[in-house]
Amino acid sequence: MMKFLTYISLFILTSSCAPFVDSPFSDALLRPERNLNQLSISKLGNIEADGKITLAVFSDSHQNYKQTDKVSFEINRTPNVDFIAGLGDYTNSAYNLEYDQFIDSIGLMMYPRILAIGNHDAIGAGPELFKKAFGEANFFFESGSFRYIYFNSCNLEDPEGFNPQWLLDRVSESSKPVIIFSHVQLRDPERFFGSDATILGQVITHPNTKVIFNGHNHVYNFSLDNNTIMMQCGRVDGEQGPHWLLVEITPGSPGQFCVTRMDTMENTCQNLK
Ligand SMILES: [Fe+2]
């Protein structure tokens, strides 16, 4: 009997040793990766060496891991991508297990990945989880001809991290034309009112601001706002197949912006303002 109980005890001890995370709502991650955005930025090198900047852009993967894997596969077989821009909402509820799964997913992407935070990623412990894995949600970096600014647009979920004046200051001080990456469209009438809307309006119309990328609305849309390109990426789980954007930006005066939506292969080109 003692022998039997010993075997049972050993079985229970050795068969229940999966990593333990206190709850889905905590800021504990199983994945060990940290500061992933800065790590990607440090790997960029001279992204304008071929005379243009080539970006792969995706957004709103949520829990669509299968479609995200397909997007990763398609991006990986596309030559000369300088970096991959994620526009947020990689989770549904910002649970730590969703962050872990997403970090696992993007491990398949072979180009540097630089990611914005989405409103779904900013619920509860979300901002802490994002900071832990990817770093600060407001940041910028530059290539020879452009400044790239990533903006935390989650005013309702993460009011402490939402700072439109920081964005306007980074745009205004720049000696180079600016490309912005945001989850929410900066004119969103359901989120931005009063002084916030005024400041974001100044960002959009600022002479330095050439292109603003956003996700959040799950559908593709290309438009101009005071001649600034407003490039909205749809969700990866598109109705016409895996959805992502292949973007080529050519510096110059004027520079040029070309986008191909990779589910339908529709192509649009526009001079930068
Ligand atoms: Fe969203």
Image (cartoon, grey):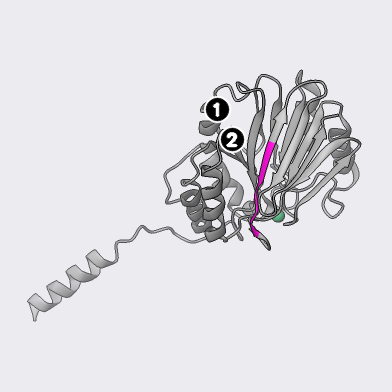
Q: Amino acid at mark 1?
A: Leu
Give the secondary structure at mark 2.
Answer: strand
| Image position, residue 62 (x, y; %) | 61, 58
Ligand 1 placement by image quarter: bottom right
Q: Would you place residue 248 above or below residue 145 in this image?
A: below
- The secondary structure that dominates the magenta segment is strand
Residue 167 position (above or below residue 8): above
Q: Closest to the observer: 262 or 118?
A: 262
| Rendered location of residue 12, percent (x, y) | 24, 70
For disc 1, does the CB lie below 8 Å from ligand 1?
no
List the residue tagged with mark 1. Answer: 44
Question: Within 8 Å: ligand 1 and the Cβ of disc 2?
Answer: no
Q: Closer to the N terminus: mark 1 or mark 2?
A: 1
Q: Is residue 165 visible?
A: no
Residue 244: image x %, image y %?
65, 49
- Left of 31 or right of it: where is 215? right
Please indicate whether residue 1 sits to the left or right of residue 77 in the image: left
Identify the image quadrant of the N terminus: bottom left
From where the camera sits, is residue 70 visible? yes
59 shown above or below 134: below
Q: Is residue 159 left or right of residue 108?
A: right
Rendering quarter of residue 207: top right
Say which residue label 2 marks.
83
